[in-house]
Image (spheres, rainbow, N blue to C red):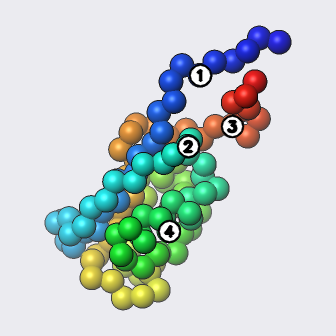
Amino acid sequence: MKQKELKAKVYPRIWAKTMRGDKMTRSYMYTLSEAFDEERMFNYVCDITHAMDIPTPLILKSHVYNFVHFNIAKFLRTEFVDDVDFDYFILENSSGTIKPLPRYFNEDM
């Protein structure tokens, strides 16, 4: 069987920012140490919010879908259990399109 080669591994970066109105109040760049996995989205958000010292929002399927397909996820103030000092929280893919590897793809082949 022919061996598959990956030309280059580019690990995605997620740019997180809190917004009040149209002004950014906090900003943080999170670099993944592996390929993006949509099933680990909660872990990524927990790491980011812990580093930014803000509460973790509720993560809906629509957030994951929007991030994977449109490179952006927006969390409104109402999606946080605790009170927050910003209007919304945005996660943006800053390294191009994130296309999750298909489940049948094996990197070791």
In the displayed structure image, the side of residue 22 where residue 87 appears, left or right: right
Rendered residue at 55%/43% (across/down): 34
Q: Residues within 10 Å of mark 3 (few under 14, many from 20)?
A: few
Q: What amino acid is at disc 2? A: Glu
Across and down, in percent, residue 13 comes to 41, 46
Q: Do we see residue 70 in this rendering?
A: no
Dot placed on the residue nearer the N-terminal end, 3 or 4: 4
In the displayed structure image, the side of residue 91 where residue 69 appears, left or right: right
Which SS class for mark 1? loop
Q: How much space separates mark 1 and mark 2, taking CA atoms?
A: 14 Å
Single out the residue that lies furthest toward the top: 2
Q: Residues within 10 Å of mark 2 (few under 14, many from 20)?
A: few
Q: Nearer the viewer, mark 3 or mark 4?
A: 4
Rendered residue at 64%/56% (across/down): 39
Which SS class for mark 3? loop
Quadrant holding the N terminus: top right
Single out the residue that lies furthest toward the left: 23
- The mark found on residue 6 in the picture is 1
Q: Which residue is mark 2?
A: 34
Dot placed on the residue nearer the N-terminal end, 1 or 2: 1
Q: What amino acid is at disc 1? A: Leu
On the image, which quarter does residue 41 sit in?
A: bottom right
Q: Nearer the viewer, residue 49 or 93?
A: 49
Q: Which residue is mark 3?
A: 102
- The mark found on residue 46 in the picture is 4
Q: Residues within 10 Å of mark 4 (few under 14, many from 20)?
A: some
Across and down, in percent, residue 32 comes to 48, 48
Dot placed on the residue nearer the N-terminal end, 4 or 2: 2
Q: How much space separates mark 4 and mark 2, taking CA atoms?
A: 16 Å
Q: What amino acid is at disc 3? A: Pro
